[in-house]
Image (spheres, helix red, strand yellow):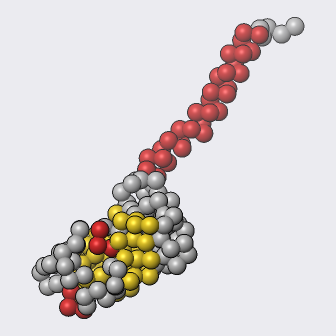
Amino acid sequence: MSDLSRRHFLKLGACLAGGACAGTVLPMAEASQEAKEASTLTTTLPYPRLKLVNISELEIRHEMRLTYPDVDSPISLIKFGTRILHGIGPEGDIVAFSRYCTHMGGHLQFKADTGAFHCPLHFAMFDAQKSGLMVIGQATDNLPQVELEMDDRGDIYAFGVKGLIYGRQANVLA
């Protein structure tokens, strides 16, 4: 007969199982520290500071189509001519928004007469003069607004996005 009792057998089995788990978990813990710095689940991601245009290139109530934060993210930059919520510039009238509808990603169309973005898919409407507020439709989120700043020469820069761009888990930059 063996000198190994049931109690010793279970202790040995527990030690082996614990060692195997520790051997796989410890390297993962170290890797998670590195991944934490660039996680796609964080709420604040680094955005590039990108020059979009000079204020002299803008016309009142004329949509300028650009991309930000990457080439797969169409935006619209608009100068309204009257002060609006979160606008920049001397008159506080310049804003930019994602052109993807927050409902199903339809390409929004800016209508100068209403000052709003309209979605051709399900007729959602977002008020560009009120920080992209969803006015009507099936969308549940407001339009993501591009954070802008202007320097002394009148150059307008994008440096971030408030809100989640449609189709992304986070506003990930590749």
Identify the residue at horizontal 72%, vertical 9% (top origin): 7
- Quarter of the picture holding the N terminus: top right
Q: How far across and how far down the image is residue 96, in percent?
A: 32, 76
Identify the residue at horizontal 35%, vertical 80% (top origin): 114
Front one among 72 and 126: 126
* Residue 67 image-quadrant placement: bottom left
Work out whether 140 lies above or below 159: above
Q: In the image, 149: left or right of 63?
A: left
Count of marks, rendered view: 0
Identify the residue at horizontal 33%, vertical 73% (top origin): 128
* Residue 48 image-quadrant placement: bottom left
Q: In the image, 73: left or right of 80?
A: right
Work out whether 46 lies above or below 67: above
Q: In the image, 60: left or right of 103?
A: left
Identify the residue at horizontal 52%, vertical 79% (top origin): 120
Q: How far across and how far down the image is residue 91, in percent?
A: 15, 78
Residue closest to the far right? 1
Residue 53 visible to the viewer:
no
Q: In the image, 15: left or right of 51?
A: right
* Residue 75 image-quadrant placement: bottom left
Q: How far across and how far down the image is residue 15, in percent?
A: 65, 22
Residue 104 visible to the viewer:
yes
Work out whether 51 lies above or below 21: below
